[in-house]
Image (tube, helix red, strand yellow):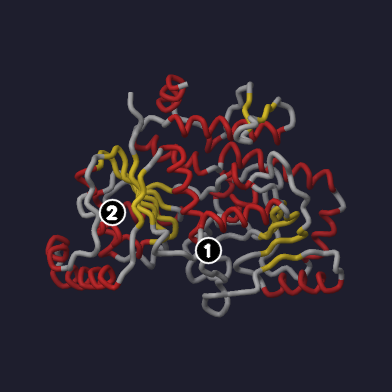
């Protein structure tokens, strides 16, 4: 039986913000485990003109077909073969018009699913959302918007949690010394930042890493910038977290309550910090989804976003090195069994009834072996040629890593 063929549509050539790099990492894992072909969307004056004309033609004609016929064609890619799965991955809903660059994608793809990372219920463009009606399943990274998307499109919509390339972020096989005391990147609270910065000035031995550049954002609530290479940035970021003792991780958009009024959302920082074995401190989301994703003791040490007493808290935590060591091991262990991007791809495959690829099976074995190395009891033997551990015992994945019975049957048959 041949393996499923996959076609990706990526926005990496359109959106090069640092915050988008995690999604491009997801695409890289998809390609590595499935051999997927990837089409990179382009952004040009012709594409933007086409979108604007489509928007107004749709509004005034009331017809999607009329708007499509009126809007000038942007740069398009003609597919010359068929695929089992079309999987475009979007940072937000305003990128959906990139689908127009592959005008006949539905005809060439047996199944179609998309993943949209960030959506807010009061900022959903109707003229773009209706482009989703051709998908079999819609996956979203914002748990509170799934019902709204399903109602507006008439298509099944499911929450798909964020993730991380655990094999890249985990401090293995050689754990570097954690020479950075606190890592605090992106959005930050002024009081927390000032307390840590003052301590760094007072004690030169205290290493506090933080962003010094804010290339965009309103009132400095967002701190983001452009990157030359998403893959290079993720490798650098992983290296940074592997060397950090504490990592400040807060719920998504923690300082923009006007966007999260419907409920907290999970920031990808929690997946990254756990995989790197950091002790995470911050304000976690107050939702069931987060409790299910990070249900082990001390996954996050709760600290208010504005925490002028942050230095005293860190001193208290430092007084219990055994607890810190356990937290770091547990974080990597659970990340390896539950939060790698391969598990998110597995969820997409399960939803559509697609069999796992050999690459997906191999990666899951690598992740289980990695988890065993941080559990401390199972025997792990490194493979010299790849640096990836292999394992001669079976470890049952927990919750998010558990396969459905049908998927399990196919998995067993393939192995």
Which residue is at the front of the view, 68 or 18? Answer: 18
* Snapshot quadrant of residue 50: bottom left
Residue 250's disc is none
Q: CA distance from mark 1 to mark 2?
A: 26 Å
* Snapshot quadrant of residue 245: bottom right
Note whether 382 is above or below 320 in the view shown. Answer: above
Residue that badge 2 annotates: 132
For residue 10, side relative to residue 247 (left or right): left
Residue 198 position within the rendered picture, expressed as x and y whole percent measured from the top left? 80, 74
Residue 223 position within the rendered picture, expressed as x and y whole percent measured from the top left? 57, 71
Q: Residues within 10 Å of mark 1 (few under 14, many from 20)?
A: some
For residue 354, side relative to residue 186 (left or right): left
Q: Residues within 10 Å of mark 2 (few under 14, many from 20)?
A: many
For residue 6, side relative to residue 376 (left or right): left
Residue that badge 1 annotates: 18
Which residue is at the front of the view, 228 or 127? Answer: 228
Give the residue furthest to the bottom.
Answer: 219
Note whether 32 is above or below 89 in the view shown. Answer: above
Which residue is at the front of the view, 119 or 275? Answer: 275
Residue 132 position within the rendered picture, expressed as x and y whole percent measured from the top left? 28, 54
Q: Residue at coordinates 70% horizontally, 36% vertically from top-left?
A: 374
Q: Secondary structure at mark 1?
A: helix
Q: Residue at coordinates 66% horizontally, 38% vertically from top-left?
A: 333
Which residue is at the front of the view, 368 or 225? Answer: 225
Quadrant into which the N terminus falls: top left
Note whether 11 is above or below 218 in the view shown. Answer: above
| Contact (Cβ within 8 Å) of mark 1 with mark 2 | no
Note whether 277 is above or below 195 in the view shown. Answer: above
Residue 222 position within the rendered picture, expressed as x and y whole percent measured from the top left? 55, 71
Q: Earlier in the sequence, mark 1 or mark 2?
A: 1
In this view, the mark in front (1 or 2):
1
């Amino acid at each position: 039986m041949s393996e499923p063929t996959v076609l990706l549509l990526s926005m990496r050539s359109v959106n090069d913000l640092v915050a988008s790099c995690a999604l491009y990492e997801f695409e890289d894992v998809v390609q590595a485990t499935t051999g997927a072909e990837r089409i990179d969307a382009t952004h040009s004056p012709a594409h933007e003109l086409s979108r604007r004309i489509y928007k107004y033609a749709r509004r005034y004609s009331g017809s999607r077909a009329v708007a499509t016929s009126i809007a000038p064609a942007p740069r398009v890619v003609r597919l010359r073969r068929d695929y089992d799965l079309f999987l475009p991955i979007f940072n937000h809903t305003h990128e959906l018009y990139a689908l127009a660059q592959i005008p006949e994608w539905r005809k060439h793809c047996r199944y179609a699913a998309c993943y949209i990372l960030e959506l807010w219920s009061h900022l959903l463009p109707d003229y773009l959302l209706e482009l989703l009606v051709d998908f079999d399943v819609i996956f979203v990274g914002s748990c509170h918007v799934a019902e709204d998307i399903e109602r507006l499109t008439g298509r099944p919509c499911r929450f798909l949690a964020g993730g991380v390339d655990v094999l890249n972020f985990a401090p293995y096989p050689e754990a570097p010394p954690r020479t950075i005391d606190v890592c605090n990147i992106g959005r930050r609270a002024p009081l927390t930042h000032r307390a840590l910065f003052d301590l760094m000035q007072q004690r030169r031995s205290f290493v506090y890493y933080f962003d010094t550049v804010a290339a965009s954002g309103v009132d400095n609530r967002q701190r983001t910038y452009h990157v030359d290479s998403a893959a290079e940035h993720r490798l650098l970021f992983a290296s940074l977290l592997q060397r950090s003792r504490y990592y400040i991780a807060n719920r998504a958009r923690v300082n923009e309550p006007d966007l999260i009024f419907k409920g907290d959302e999970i920031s990808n920082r929690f997946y990254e910090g756990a995989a790197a074995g950091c002790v995470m401190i911050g304000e976690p989301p107050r939702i069931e989804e987060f409790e299910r994703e990070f249900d082990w003791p001390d996954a996050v040490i709760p600290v208010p976003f504005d925490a002028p007493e942050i230095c005293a808290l860190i001193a208290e935590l430092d007084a219990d090195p055994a607890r810190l060591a356990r937290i770091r091991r547990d974080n990597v262990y659970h990340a390896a069994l539950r939060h790698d991007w391969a598990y998110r791809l597995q969820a997409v495959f399960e939803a559509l009834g697609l069999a796992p690829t050999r690459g997906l099976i191999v990666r899951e074995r690598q992740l289980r072996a990695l988890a065993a190395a941080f559990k401390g009891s199972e025997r792990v033997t490194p493979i010299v040629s790849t640096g990836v551990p292999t394992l001669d015992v079976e470890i049952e994945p927990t919750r998010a890593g558990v396969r459905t019975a049908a998927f399990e049957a196919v998995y067993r048959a393939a192995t």
